[in-house]
Image (cartoon, helix red, strand yellow):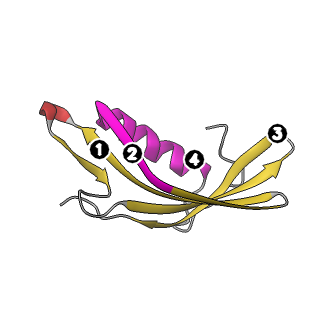
Amino acid sequence: LYWLSEDYLDSYGYGRSEVRKILKDVFDALEDINVTIINRKMMITDDTALVTIVFKVVGTVDMGMRGYVAGNLNQPAEVVVKFRKLSEGWRIIGVSRFDSAMTQ
């Protein structure tokens, strides 16, 4: 996960290693993933950028069951990603406000 800074920390208290494990578990569990970006807004100030992304994620799990992983038919998920420009390039330093209407 080269795009995550070494000192990444999100609003849930997860660091880089925890995010790596979560993403691995999600990608191992899903056979097919479709991410739809509905809207995005970016604000850049010097060496910091805030990107708000509104999106839905649909995936297929065991036995071909397909459903929403983030967001749902009527309400998308929203996340704010904070980037910082470091010597090695732009890196994610944090994520906050992950509002998701998760499928039951």
Residue 23 on image: x %, y % = 45, 43
Q: CA distance from mark 3 to mark 2?
A: 29 Å
Query: At x 48% / y 56%, what residue is drawn?
Result: 39
> Which one is in front, 57 or 3?
57
Disc 4 designates what residue? 17
Disc 2 designates what residue? 36
Evaluate if marks 3 and 2 touch, with contact meaning CB atoms under 8 Å apart: no
The part of the chain drawn in magenta is 16-39
* Camera-nearest label, 4 or 2: 2
Evaluate if marks 2 and 1 touch, with contact meaning CB atoms under 8 Å apart: yes
Residue 33 on image: x %, y % = 34, 36
Query: At x 30% / y 37%, what residue is drawn?
Result: 29
Dot 4 or dot 2, earlier in sequence: 4
Disc 1 designates what residue? 58
- Amino acid type at circle 4 is Ser
* Camera-nearest label, 2 or 1: 2
> Which one is in front, 68 or 14?
68
Dot 3 alpha-carbon crowd within 10 angstroms: few under 14, some 14 to 19, many 20 or more: few
Disc 3 designates what residue? 88
Dot 4 alpha-carbon crowd within 10 angstroms: few under 14, some 14 to 19, many 20 or more: few
* Camera-nearest label, 3 or 2: 2
Q: Is residue 27 left or right of residue 17?
A: left
Query: At x 85% / y 60%, what residue is drawn?
Result: 46
How many circles with numbers are drawn on the protein? 4
Q: Secondary structure at mark 1?
A: strand
Q: Is residue 97 left or right of residue 55?
A: right
